[in-house]
Structures are given as structure tokens and as C-alpha cells.
Amino acid sequence: MVVLFVIAAAAVFYLRQYGGPLFRHPVVAVRLIRTDAPPRLPVPVRGVAASRLVDTWGGIRSGGRRHQGIDIFAPRGREIVSTTRGIVVTVGYASLGGRVVRVLGPGGYWHYYAHLERFAAIRPGDLVEAGTVLGYVGDSGNARGTPPHLHYGIYRFRGGAVNPYDFLAPVRPQRRGSP
């Protein structure tokens, strides 16, 4: 019995230490995946109104790729905030995205923030709420030399990218008599 306890304790320690951010909060991760994704999200760049967003989804990119996100232009250094509560999974560097942060949020959606100038005081495994500062607008990665912006992408846990504009765009009131 003692041997099983020691093995179990060692396994938990190992998974928490080396098994990745989701293993540090397994109950939270399962709850996030099982919770419905919100139908609307706040704009992830402080001070940018939803009415100023442009749908850049599907635009042609180098290497025959298509844009799988939305570019939100803002002054360099403007705060980038989490659109949802979640678990920070990635704080690092990617060849295309440059400085990137990835957060697992409700519905098992991955929220991807790219081209950051610098990171906020976050690290993989941190629990965040909507509005938590993740980093600051920049032009890192393959955006070097372009106007500063955030590339924001949303990916299903299973099933690929979805257009973030549909979650961020302002809701237009329906006119009387409209369906």
C-alpha cells in the first residue's frame, strides 16, 4: 500500500512538474472543455472598439497559406488581454507568430495571441480571467516591419480554426419587423 502511494505521489509530482500546463490544473482543464464557449468575446486589445475591427479571415498569406485569424492594429505597446478565463498553455516564440501566448478557454477553444512586443508577467500553467494582461502589441515573427498589431486566432480543441471576427464583431440591433 505504501509503495502504491509513493508511486501515485511521484506520478502526480511528475505530471505537475513536467507534464505541461494542463496537468497543473486538470480539474479546471476538464471544466473548461466541458463548459460552453461564450457566443461573444471582448476585443483583446485595450482601447480598440469592436466597430473598428476588419474581418481579415481567409486572406492570402505567403507560402499559399490563408489567414486563420484577425489582425487588430493598435499602437505598439498597447495591452493585449485575455478574451476569456482559462489556462495559459504557451508563452514563447514561434517562427510565424513571433512572441505568442496560447490560452485554453471555455468550450475547449484555444485562443492564440501572436506578434507580441513583449509578454506580461505570465507563464504556462497560470489561470487567467477575461481581461488579464497577456502582453503588448508589437510586430514580432513574420510581422517584423509591418504596423504593430495583434494576430488573434481561435482554434477548436478538435476541428481547426474558426473566424474570431464572428465572436468579436459588434452586435447590430435588428430593425423592427426583421427576422
Image (cartoon, grey):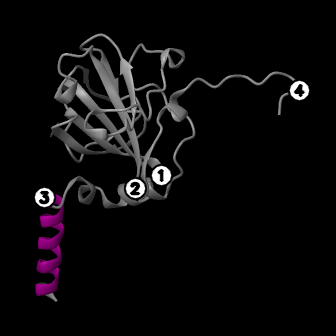
Q: Residue furthest front?
A: 64
Tell me what residue is drawn at x 15 percent, y 72 percent: 11
Q: Nearer the viewer, mark 1 or mark 2?
A: 2
Q: Does the magenta stretch include residue 118?
A: no
Question: In the rendered image, which residue does mark 1 sit on?
Answer: 107
Alpha carbons under labels 2 and 3: distance apart: 23 Å
Quadrant of residue 70 within the rendered picture: top left
Q: Which amino acid does label 4 sit on?
A: Gly
Screen quadrant of the C terminus: top right
Q: What residue type is labelled 2?
A: Phe
Helix, strand or loop at label 3? It is helix
Q: Relative to 125, does residue 75 appear above or below in the rendering? A: above
Start-end of magenta stretch? 3-18
Question: In the rendered image, which residue does mark 2 sit on?
Answer: 157
Question: In the rendered image, which residue does mark 4 sit on?
Answer: 177
Q: Relative to 18, does residue 64 appear above or below in the rendering? A: above
Question: Residue 125 vs residue 59: left or right?
Answer: left
Question: Residue 52 vs residue 174: left or right?
Answer: left
Alpha carbons under labels 1 and 2: distance apart: 8 Å
First reached walking from the N terminus: tag 2 or tag 3: 3
Instruction: Assess disc 2: are there few (<14), some (14-19) or many (≥20) residues with their C-alpha within 10 Å of its C-alpha.
Output: some
Instruction: Assess disc 4: are there few (<14), some (14-19) or many (≥20) residues with their C-alpha within 10 Å of its C-alpha.
Output: few
Q: Which of marks 4 and 1 is in front?
A: 4
